[in-house]
Amino acid sequence: MTTRYTEDHEWITVDGDIATVGITAFAAGQLGDVVFVELPEVGKTLAKGDEFAVVESVKAASEVYAPVDGEITAINDALEGEPAKVNEDATGDGWFVKIKLADAAQLDGLMDEAAYNAHTA
Amino acid sequence: MTETLHKTPLHALHVELGGKMVPFAGYDMPVQYPLGIMGEHKHCREQAGLFDVSHMGQARYVGDEAALEALLTCDLSEIGAGEQKYTLLPNERGGIRDDLMVSRPDGKGIYLVVNAATKDADFAHIEAATAGKGNLTRIPERALLALQGPAAKDVMARLCPEACKMVFMQCGLFTLDGVDVMMSRSGYTGEDGFEISIPEADADRIARLLLAQDEVAAIGLGARDSLRLEAGLCLYGHDMDENRTAVEASLIWALAKTRRERGDFPGADVIATQIEEKTCQKRVGLTLTGAPAREGAEIADKSGNVIGIVTSGGFGPTVSGPVAMGYVDRDFMKPGTEVDILVRGKPRAATITKLPFVPANFYRG
């Protein structure tokens, strides 16, 4: 499994042709306490850069963008009752969606962990 | 273009405390500290919070009080020594130029506190209208702190016990750790608390003294907004502005009965007509589940017809759910009425809810 990052602070971990996507701990920390996450419906097709979710903190709403093209195969229903999981475990229980990759080569254009850490430093 | 932001006398302290600084009304202000908006909000509701509100406009008016009163909606003769009132500065259309506090903390005329974003316009307006009759003196050399929350009185009992004799909306001159301060028992959170006007040279030291008390945490503008929203209090420029009247804003209580009878404040005719006709929109509270509704979201009836708009909205940490205020057509103003709020185009079920969302906790003696 490899994990890549976007400049907009999404992470994407790939296992076969299925990718799990969420926002980074850095992003969650910047947003503050997450109180609601609006997720897309399973089956929705995304193009890289599409807004596919919205994270609501106490103060503001922030869009989350698709890091790659693909189709939503699962959403993290647990966030509905426990949006704070995004703060507590951004890259684990706080995942947003699973996407069936349309073009695995798109991953090459994203940052690896070292590059992302430099990006947020 | 780089805008030069003003700094309050507590700016260095905010930075030292780890405040996340943002531009607000021309000032570089802390939106939150490391505790975070949710934690700060709850701390203030449960214990006590210290707010820097030095960006607000303080001034003193001395002279012909009728000239000042003519611009406001209060009856200055009803404000005795040591008393404070919330009032409005209306325009000729009955719209609201600003909301403000007027008080008599001492024998030296009227002390005013207005909003930061409107202070220059307010003061210029008052000066022009009272020219030759009275003198308005701005007091930019004073900081303004707010200590809010149920434990504020316990803190004050240690540091300035005399101030605890005040009840809600009283004010006076006190000595706080050797500093002469003007203080009122009021605030913008729905909680008991004190607002402290203090010479800027002493502000940092007094703020640190207050923060050193076990009950007190520093609170940023983010929690200030969620606290006032739960308390059902208007934010100028959002829940009220030049195009909304006191009747629409559900602030008829801020119009003195004597002034309404005399009809002698700007826009009084418009106000009288609206009270009589009962057709204008009204400001109401709204609760919903799931996604918070933000400012600008449309409010619709159950058939999808737009019947209003959200003017303030977010998550209420004490309510533990999304709360909003907005304007709706009369037919929908009654608490319990079911409506939809369009959040990112999607209708979300919402209920008109009596304000405040959290019961006021003022000390009335």
Image: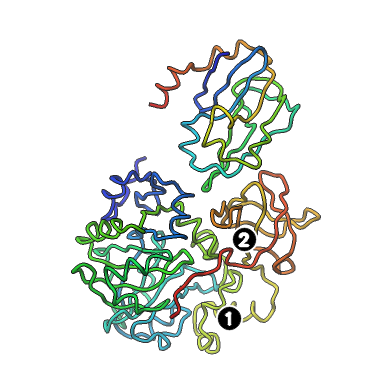
Amino acid type, callout 2: Gly
Q: Report whether residue B124 is seen.
A: no
Amino acid type, callout 1: Asp
Q: Residue at x 24, y 69 (%)?
A: B176
The quadrant the C terminus of chain B occupies is: bottom left
The quadrant the N terminus of chain B occupies is: top left
Q: Residue at x 31, y 68 (%)?
A: B196
| Mark 1 lies on residue | B269
Closer to us: B22 or B117:
B22
Is tag 2's residue or tag 1's residue first in the polypeptide sequence?
A: 1
SS class of the residue under badge 1?
A: helix
Q: Residue at x 60, y 57 (%)?
A: B324
Residue B289 higher or lower than A52, as above or below? below
Please check whether the numbered discs 2 and 1 fall on a single chain: yes
Which corner quadrant of the image does residue A47 belong to? top right
Closer to us: B219 or B129:
B219
Mark 2, residues whose alpha carbon is within 10 Å: few (<14), some, or many (≥20)?
many
| Mark 2 lies on residue | B326
Q: Nearer the viewer, mark 2 or mark 1?
A: 2
SS class of the residue under badge 2?
A: strand
Mark 1, residues whose alpha carbon is within 10 Å: few (<14), some, or many (≥20)?
some
Closer to us: B208 or B81:
B208
Instruction: Tell me where residue B45 appears, x and y as whole percent.
Output: 47, 60
